[in-house]
């Protein structure tokens, strides 16, 4: 756990992102999930984002 700091504050942020398809259709399979995860990991490096957990149904 690494805290972020500003001039007058210390904070730790966690975000929970849920992607839902229209009518809850089962569109995201293992292949699409793996592609999305690798894309997110590649993009997250430039924004200093750490992926803690990745799941899909």
Image (spheres, rainbow, N blue to C red):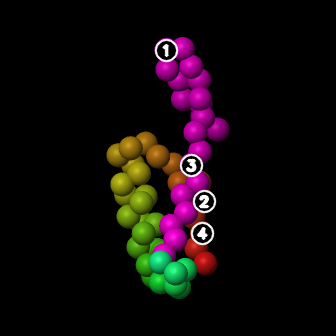
Indicate the position of residue 17 as horizontal and vertical percent values: 54, 58
**Rendered-image quadrant of the C terminus:** bottom right
Say which element carries label 2. loop
The reply to whether discs 2 and 3 touch (Cβ–Cβ < 8 Å) is no
Tell me the element at label 3. loop
- Mark 2 surroundings within 10 Å by alpha-carbon count, few (fewer than 14), some (14 through 19), many (20 or more): few
C-alpha separation, residue under disc 1 versus residue under disc 4: 36 Å
Q: Helix, strand or loop at disc 4?
A: loop
Quarter of the image for residue 8 reads top right
Q: Which mark is residue 27?
A: none
Q: Which residue is mark 4?
A: 55
Residues at discs 1 and 4 in contact (Cβ within 8 Å): no
Residue depicted at x 60% and y 69%: 55
Which tag, 3 or 1, sits closer to the chain's start? 1
Looking at the rendering, which quadrant does residue 32 occupy? Answer: bottom left
Q: Is residue 31 left or right of residue 46?
A: right
Taking the spot 55% from the left edge, 80% from the top edge, the residue there is 24
Above or below — where is 52 with respect to 19?
A: above
Magenta span includes 12: yes
Q: Which residues are magenta?
A: 1-21
Of tags 4 and 3, the one toward the viewer is 3
Q: Is residue 21 visible?
A: yes
Residue located beneath label 3 in the image:
15
Neighbours of disc 4 within 10 Å: few (<14), some (14-19), many (20+): few
Based on the picture, tell me whether residue 3 belongs to the magenta stretch: yes
- The residue that label 2 is drawn on is 53
Q: Are marks 4 and 3 in contact (CB under 8 Å)?
A: no
Among the two numbered marks 1 and 4 on one chain, the one whose residue lies closer to the N terminus: 1
Q: Provide residue 6's location: percent of width, then percent of height.
A: 49, 20
């Amino acid at each position: 756990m690494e805290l972020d700091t500003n001039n007058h504050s210390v904070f730790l942020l966690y975000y929970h992102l849920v992607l839902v398809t229209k009518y809850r259709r089962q569109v995201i399979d293992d292949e699409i999930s793996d592609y999305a995860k690798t894309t997110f990991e590649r993009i997250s490096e430039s924004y200093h984002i750490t992926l803690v957990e990745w799941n899909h149904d």
